[in-house]
Structures are given as structure tokens and as C-alpha cells.
Amino acid sequence: MWRSGLNSRSTTTAQALKEKKWDALVIGSGHNGLTAAAYLARGGLSVAVLERRHVIGGAAVTEEIIPGFKFSRCSYLQSLLRPSVIRELELKRHGLKLLKPTATTFTPCLDGRYLLLGHDDERNYLEISKFSKYDADAFPRYENQLYKFCKLMDFVLDSQAPETLHWDSSFTAWMRDKLEKSVFWAQCLRHVMALGQKDMVNFMDLLLSPTSKVLNKWFESDILKAVLAGDAIVGSMASIHTPGSGYVLLHHVMGETDGERNVWSHVEGGMGSVSTAISNAAIEAGASIMTNAEVSQLMIGNSGTIEGVLLADGTRVRSSVVLSNATPHRTFLGLVPRDALPEDFLRAIENSDYNSGTTKINVAVDKLPWFHCCGSNNTEAGPQHTATIHICSESMDNIGSACQDAQNGLPSKRPVMEMTIPSSLDKTISPPGKHVVSLFTQYTPYKPSDGSWENPTYREAYAKRCFSLIDEYAPGFSSSIIGYDMLTPPDLEREFGLTGGNIFHGATGLDSLFFMRPAKGWSGYRTPVRGLYLCGSGTHPGGGVMAAPGRNAARIALRDFKNHHS
């Protein structure tokens, strides 16, 4: 999906960028920045997107690191992209093609057993029954309860946060704001009433509880609990025993593919194809996209209003509005002059949690992995190869120990790994007979206490540890490796601008969800600098390839622009 990004495409020259005053500039071509640009351009504004790297897409990117192998270098599956964005920007027409896996999760065990779950309820019942008849009966009830919460979640995700108006506004704008807030809370109340008291209490229990407590209440078999717990720890340094970690369990069902809930799909061409499709929609609407255009500072006038940006090469680009797709930390502590921000706001940003335990390893292999628990060694892709494969995830203790290692400052001895093999469905990303394997591994501290990620020997030792652990489940995996690309937390920060290596632009703990992002009182995309907006995952409703922050921020910025220029 990132193929489009492989050819650095510049739709405007540096000279044209400099000579004109733009209505809006977007810093960063991550999927949220591109989404914001598309909506702004469709609203009639002149828009330029400024991307620091040679390729668009931010963390939703496809890059050919090893000749013939196209890696989704960071994000690797699609489910959370809002249906409203797919529909309104006509992303299917712009080239987005989703590939539905034949199974959803596959968990091999060292004792020769496995758990393979998919789209067939009867088949799932039989699979779970291998471990527990009680759990097989409970599983549909568990999923149905989560599905009940989805309508409320959909409403929250697609809504702009009902924040206080911070900037001076006309009486008309003030009245409209009051009315919109009333409508939001009335609709929110309607969704809560529709859930009913019992389900609302269950919803609060899910939000506030540790993952382990939620799953222990529902199930008895360790393997099913561990498979589901994997959804709750993605991209986090939090333990499954941390209160509030249960919220991310909702991601298990929150997303959808073509209207079908709980389907995480591969994207033809890799995740860069999501960014390409959105950029195609933005360009068609009139937006310009510049790569190799790093923003070094925001230009702010004496009145505290945005006037444009200064690029790293000294170019000044003027605009009335700027939307930042960078992390809140990078935006406010790196691009905005310190004296332009209130002290209490700066303190909140400085104290935000960017801890992350994620290391992504992209591997080129000369054959499909063969899992010994599946019996005969068939060279054809089976349902297990299309699924999300959980390695070292047979029990809650495995996950708990891996997290404890990292909290002690060490990369996990037995990292929890999500393995995906997109080439099992997508023939466009690897040579015939060869495959792309994505490993999302946890937990790896940003600064390990026993070495440094800058040390090639230390890095290689971690990669080899992951490969040899896979060998325990899929003999011969290590010997099938042609080459690999590894991104530790400092690499993710340096290369993709992800502060602390955090894939969500900031932790998703209870104190930093929804209306608490990026700081209390500032979740409405506006910032203390008039004309500057946040449009990335660091603001409401949060991380994942969702595009909701980009869409919501653009709608706010567009309305403010039109009010100001009417």
C-alpha cells in the first residue's frame, strides 16, 4: 500500500511553495495529515503538505528495503480506518484494496497443540473446545458484549471533542459552539440510555479494569486469555495487570473490513497503499504534497497568531492555518517557540507518557514458515498463514514475564510477538515463492540497562533471539531468512518522528484517552496558538490507522477559517 510512496512525488516546486500564501499547511504526510489535507482541499482551501522524509505515509508506509520485498515498515494491518473516511474520500476508487484473511488468529503451542480462530462461529467453538468447553460457550457472549459497546464507540470516534472555546470568538461562533456541545452531550446520553444501566456498568468495568481481571472473569483456559490479552498490550509498556489496560480489548471488535466487524485485513501493496489512496483523494481535490520538506519552526506573529512555517533549508512558507500531524511533544517542544505557550500547557505536554516497548522487525524469507503443530509441511499458504500469528503467547504468564523484563530495563527474554505474513494473500509485495514476514515484538525499553540499540552486536542479538524463538514453533525459520529490517523505539523516533518510539503518539492509558488527549482542556484540535491545530494520533480519539483525528481536525480548521474570512 505504500507503493505509491516509493516514487517520491512532488506536486509543487519549492519556488511555488515560497511565492504563494497558502490557506493551510499540513506538517507531516502521515495518514492523518493526508486525510486533513483532503478534507481541507475539498472545502475549497489551498493546501500544501510538507513531509520531512523522501516518501509519504508516516507510519502507514510501504518501503522496498530488500530488493523485491515491499515491507509495511511500521503499521501492518488495517481495521480501524473509519468507514466514514473510506466512503467520503472514495478510497476504493483511489486504489484501496483490502484483503480479508481466511483466519483471524493462530496461536501455536510448544506442546504441539494450537488455537486457530476465524470467521466461522461453529469452527471457533470446536477450536476453543479443544482447550475448554466452558470457554467455547462463553466466547460468543464475550464478543457480543463487546459488540454492544461499538455504537457508543463509533459515536465517540467520529465526533469532535466538545472542548471549551479558547480563542476570542464572535457571538455567533460562541452560540454555535454552545449548541454543538448540547447536541453532542444529548447524543452521547442517547447512546448511554440505549446501552442501559447493566451494560453501561459493564462498559465502565471494561474501561477501568486490568486486562487480566476482565479475561479471568470470562474464561478459564490460559491460551484463549493470552490470545485476547495480546490485543490489549499492542504498542504499550503497560502490564496486563495495569488498571485501565482493558480498554484496548475493544480494538478486538471496534474495527471492521467492508462492514464486517472484528476483521483485520491486509492491504494490497502494503499499508502504504492506505496513504497513497488518501493522497490521491487529496491531490484530486487540489492539495499539493512536498517530500524532503522538513519544517524546523513555526512562524508566529506578534499577536500570537500563526503566520506560516520555516523549513530546515531556510525557506519561509506563509499560510493562515497550520495543522500538525507531528506528535504533540514534537509540535510544542520542537516547533513552537516556548514563549508562545502557557506554562501549564507546556508542563502537561512535557509530562505526557511516551513510553513504548515496541520493536518492529520486517523479514524477507525464501519460503513460508512451517509450524510443526500443523502436521505435514505443505508449501502452500494455509489459513494459519493469513492470520495474526501469536508467538510466545500461550499463557498470561508469558506476557506478564515479558513485560516484567522490560520494566526491569531489559528487552524481554521471550518477547511476545505478533507475526503476520501479508504475502500469503498479497502477490504484489514479494518475488514468486518468497515471502514478507512482519514481526511486531514486545517488550523492548527505549534505553536498555544492559546495552544500547546503537550497538550493532546488541541489536543483532535481539533479532536473533526473536528468530530462534520462532524456530521453536516453526523449525527452520532462521535458515529461511534472506534479510531483515529492524526498528527499535529510538529508530521509530528518529526515522518516523514517533516520540519515544510510541506508535500512538502517546500512551493510551486512562489519563490520556479521548478528551484527555493531548492535555486536559485541549482535545478539540485547536491549540494555544491561534491558527495552529493538531491533526495526528496525539489528539482525540487517539492512535491506530483510524484517520478520525485528521478528519475531525480539518472540519474544525475549515469552519474557523471560513468564519474568520467571511
Image (cartoon, rainbow, N blue to C red):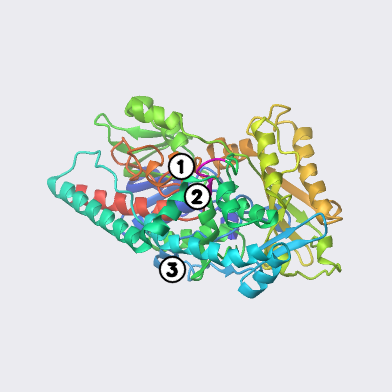
- Give the amino acid at mark 2: Tyr
Front position in the image: 490 or 522: 522
How would you rate the neighbour count of disc 1 (Cα within 10 Å): few for under 14, some for 14-19, many for 20 or more? Answer: some
Residue at the location (54% across, 62% down)?
142
Could you say which quadrant of the image residue 370 lies in?
bottom right
**Residue 424 in view (yes/no):** no
**Cα distance between the residues tagged 2 and 3:** 31 Å
- Give the amino acid at mark 3: Glu
**Cα distance between the residues tagged 3 and 1:** 34 Å
- Give the amino acid at mark 1: Leu
How would you rate the neighbour count of disc 3 (Cα within 10 Å): few for under 14, some for 14-19, many for 20 or more? Answer: some
Q: Determine whether the residue tagged by mark 1 lies in a helix, strand or loop.
A: helix
Marked residue nearer the N-terminal end (1 or 2): 2
The span picked out in magenta is 242-247
Name the spot of residue 227 as percent of width and height, x first: 65, 55
Give the label on residue 510, or none: 1
Q: Is residue 40 above or below residue 25?
A: below
Q: Check residue 246 for magenta coloring.
A: yes
Q: Determine whether the residue tagged by mark 2 lies in a helix, strand or loop.
A: helix
